Amino acid sequence: MQFFGEEDTLLGSLVSSLQPKKTETQKNWGVFAILFMAGLILIIISIPFASFLILNPKPFCLLFSSGSFVILLSMLQIIELKTLFNKISSSAATLLYLVSLIACLYTGMFYMGYFYTLGLLSLQIASLIYLTVSLFPGGKTGMHAAFNLLKNQLKGIFLKKTFLPL
């Protein structure tokens, strides 16, 4: 099976020409930091538009979705494309992220509604956090442990006769 990062395909040669060559010890931490900060800035700029989601969800959706996509692209600078593709393609969160990204842009552009947009944005945030954390060593194990802890706490709260966590 060929990956996008292999140079014997047309897309692979295009991507490899855009991605700088790096050794195992030399990573592009500077470019990663710039792209990551640009994504964070786009997300921070989108926050004031959240109060206008009912009236006009378009600016918030566009800024937030582009910011989250730039953050994901920044991972290419510290992780090789083949490794990133293998890690991302093995996760259902990637499909969830891409579907929520496209659906969020669609609902934002065509004014589908507040609750659809808000639900898709929360889904996009959760899947982006999962994808970002799972790319680092031990991140996937830590996320699963955190989800299990949260699930057990919620089960304990809601299965009791009282809702007070005493």
Image (spheres, rainbow, N blue to C red):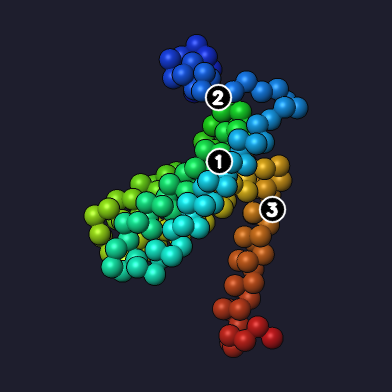
Callout 3 secondary element? helix
Residue in view at x 60 percent, y 35 percent: 31
Nearer the viewer's eye, disc 2 or disc 3?
Answer: 2
Q: Which residue is mark 3?
A: 142
Q: In the rendered view, does 48 fall on the left or right side of 110?
A: right
Q: As displayed, is residue 49 above or below residue 158?
A: above
Q: Position of residue 24 (x, y in %)?
A: 72, 25
Residue in view at x 46 percent, y 57 percent: 45
Q: Amino acid at mark 3?
A: Gly
Q: In the rendered view, does 104 fall on the left or right side of 38?
A: left
Q: Position of residue 30 (x, y in %)?
A: 65, 36
The local crowd at label 1, few if under 14, some if 14 to 19, many if 20 or more residues have their Cα within 10 Å, is: many
Residue in view at x 63 percent, y 66 percent: 150
Q: Position of residue 155 (x, y in %)?
A: 60, 72
Residue 93 visible in the current orientation? no
Q: Earlier in the sequence, mark 2 or mark 3?
A: 2
Asked whether 119 or 25 is in front, the reply is 25
Q: As displayed, is residue 33 above or below residue 166?
A: above
Between the C-alphas of marks 1 and 3, the distance is 25 Å
Between the C-alphas of marks 2 and 3, the distance is 30 Å
Q: Which residue is mark 1?
A: 35
Residue 19: mark: 2
Asked whether 31 or 142 is in front, the reply is 31
Q: Earlier in the sequence, mark 1 or mark 2?
A: 2
Q: Amino acid at mark 2?
A: Gln
The local crowd at label 3, few if under 14, some if 14 to 19, many if 20 or more residues have their Cα within 10 Å, is: few
Q: As displayed, is residue 93 above or below residue 4?
A: below
Q: Amino acid at mark 1?
A: Leu
Nearer the viewer's eye, disc 1 or disc 3?
Answer: 1
Callout 1 secondary element? helix
Residue in view at x 28 percent, y 68 percent: 55
